[in-house]
Image (tube, rainbow, N blue to C red):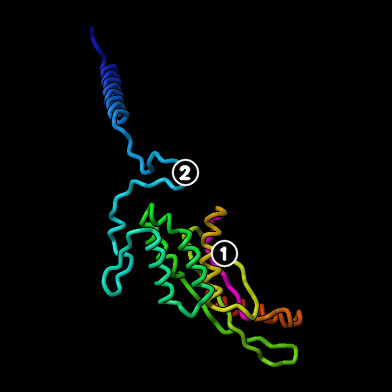
Amino acid sequence: MIVRPSYCAAYRAIAARHVQQQQAAIVTRLMSSTPKKHLVTHEEGVHQTMKLPTAWRNKPLFRRQGDVRFKSGMEASKLLIAEAHRRDSHEAEYIDSIASTMECLSPLFDRNPRYAFVAKQLMEPERFIQFRVAWMDDVGVVRLNRGFRIQYSSSLGPYQGPLHLGSHVNGGLIKALGFDNVFSNGLTGYDVGSSVGGSDFNPFDKSEAEVQRFCQSYMTELAKYVG
């Protein structure tokens, strides 16, 4: 019997495919016989422990005057709050927001220490802008206010956030609102970053024309930095 060359090539292809299928079956059997390693233990509930290496816990959280490490989640939260006090002690609203959030996250730091290092990065905004807003009132006098815009985190998406106007608005309040907005966007599932703006301009005792002139001046100045 004479086998034609085309048939020989087809036979070689079929044989090679059969060998590949046998090799894939062997790999599948080996993988199924090996027990899978899970990060989560058999305990049930949200407070189950994690089987993670201790490498993250052995890393120093801060390195200012010697390595500063933590042994528990509560200790990590206290270290982060102390760092916020050291850097921004004059911003009471921001300190309160940091303290309440870190205390709530201490069980998470205990189960997975690497999130303490993520929280350390979230304590510092990506960009904070403070600028002068000059506008003219109805009498013709030039008035001055402080404008703020913070671009806190773009980890979830492009910056997006509201404006807050009032005599109580300051830099600490804007930073606190930006920090809280990071977790709000994460919980709601919106793919947007955290950004908040505002000014110490009080719109309640101003006329409609004054509010309009202030908003025009605010956006004109903000466009120099944001675009």
- Please indicate whether residue 72 sits to the left or right of residue 209 in the image: left
Question: Which label lies toward us, 2 or 1?
Answer: 2
Q: Main secondary structure of the magenta part?
A: strand
Above or below residue 19? Residue 211 is below
Asked whether residue 11 is in view, the answer is yes
Which mark, residue 103? Answer: none
Element class at badge 1: strand
Frontmost residue, 19 versus 178: 178
Residue 115, picture quadrant: bottom left
List the single residue furthest toward the left. Answer: 1
Q: Mark 1: give few (<14), some (14-19) or many (20+) Cα within 10 Å.
A: some
Element class at badge 2: loop
Residue 101 placed where, x, y %? 49, 63
Residue 180 placed where, x, y %? 53, 64
- Please report the bounds of the magenta region as a residue range: 190-200
List the single residue furthest toward the top. Answer: 1
Residue for badge 1 = 160
Frontmost residue, 129 versus 183: 183
Q: Is residue 30 magenta?
A: no
Identity, as a three-letter code, of the amino acid under mark 1: Gln
Residue for badge 2 = 45
Residue 169 placed where, x, y %? 60, 77
Identity, as a three-letter code, of the amino acid under mark 2: Gly
